[in-house]
Amino acid sequence: MDHPPSVIERASLRDLALVSLKLGFTAFGGPAAHIAMLHDETVVRRRWTTEQHFLDMLGVTNLIPGPNSTEMVIHTGYEHRGWRGLLVAGWLFILPAASIVLVLAWLYVRYGTTPEGTWLLYGIKPVIIAVVAQALWNLGRTAIKGALLGAIAAVVLGLYLLGIKELALLFGGGFIAVAALGARRIPRNDGLALVAMPLGSMKLPVLATIAADATVPYSPLRLFLTFLKIGSVLYGSGYVLLAFLRGDFVERLGWLTERQLLDALAIGQVTPGPVFTTATFVGYLVGGVPGAVLATLGIFIPAFVLVAAVNPLVPRLRSSPWMGAFLDGVNVAAIGLMAAVTLELGQAALVDWLTVALAAVAAVLLIRYRINSAWLVVVGALIGLLAREFGGVIGIGPA
């Protein structure tokens, strides 16, 4: 398979597997942090692709449902090694987190509690702030090509903090960029339909009807179809996932209590890798190991299908002047969203002098010395665990 011009150096299947596994074990902090670490590995350190193409993949990924950071890893694997790369990169990013969550679910069922992760995150979160800030700086220099696009990014940041939904901001940024850049009409057979196509796949009326007709008794097939539906239609953060899980598993099916649902989401947040592995926890609670496997497969399968469908369209989107402008607007809107999420995370992460110092030192090591971000995450975790022993003496600790 010849690699596209956007791929500077074609990665081997082994290298894809190693990068995906590394991220699967060390990518804490949510989708923005995962994407920042993927950018560091594939654009900055290994030069597998260009800044512009990474941005274009990110823009398209934001327009389809599913876990964005997982889909970015899947995109990377597909571009370098086709279907084998798609499956290897995607599942080796998912499986470490799913395995850790499965062990924690077993402990939860056996002992009735979740292991304490507060101090672990206390040391990791400041490092993640530095990792995301570095990625924002690098991506922003490529994405913001003028005052107009810079203004769109700033407006998106502000509107997100005011509570406007992510999808509206992404499409709004794209359409504003197109209008402002003077596009007067959509040429026949142009690429606009390429953006509408993935959104049409959100509806899946038959699948949604099957899941909606579920009855209260537990059924492995119903569990799988419910998570398949969620993975096919869900946009947004882990908090949006919480709303879907509450509606299906607490209110409609009655398979979980409110407390179990919150514990499931907490486990998804404190473990590395995609937050969607919350599904693994829920599946284990209601159906044991088989339920965990079915839930994990159900929520992630749509991501593989959607990436395989839209990835070949990315170069065509960029080659169309009309759609190139739209993609530029979506890209800077995505930068604005990442910046807003970083500000929110920063308020929770930088709580005392030690966390501020951790973030500052990590930023210097990343920018000046290009230290691998995965090692910094590990060091941050160790510092967090050490701080647990001495925090009361020196006046530090989680807020």
Image (tube, grey):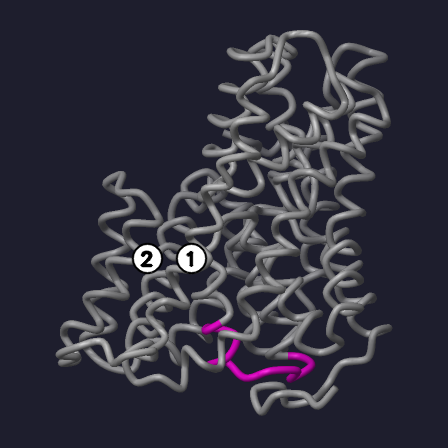
Q: Does residue 216 appear in this view?
A: yes
> Tag 1's secondary structure?
loop
Q: Does the residue at mark 1 contact the one at mark 2 (Cβ under 8 Å)?
A: yes
Amino acid type of the residue that numbered disc 2 sits on in the rendered structure? Leu
Depicted 52 relative to depicted 196: above or below: below
In the image, taking residue 241 as reference, residue 335 lies left or right, namely: left
In the image, taking residue 74 as reference, residue 102 lies left or right, namely: right
Pick the front one: 62 or 258: 62
Q: Position of residue 112 (x, y in %)?
A: 77, 10
Residue under label 1, please give it: 63
Numbered label attached to residue 365: none
Pick the front one: 239 or 351: 239
Depicted 237 relative to depicted 171: above or below: above
Q: Residues within 10 Å of mark 1 (few under 14, many from 20)?
A: some
Pick the front one: 372 or 51: 51
The image quadrant where one finds the N terminus is: bottom right
Q: Magenta segment: does it hold 48?
A: yes
Q: Position of residue 113 (x, y in %)?
A: 74, 14
In the image, taking residue 322 as reference, residue 226 lies left or right, namely: right
Residue under label 2, please give it: 170
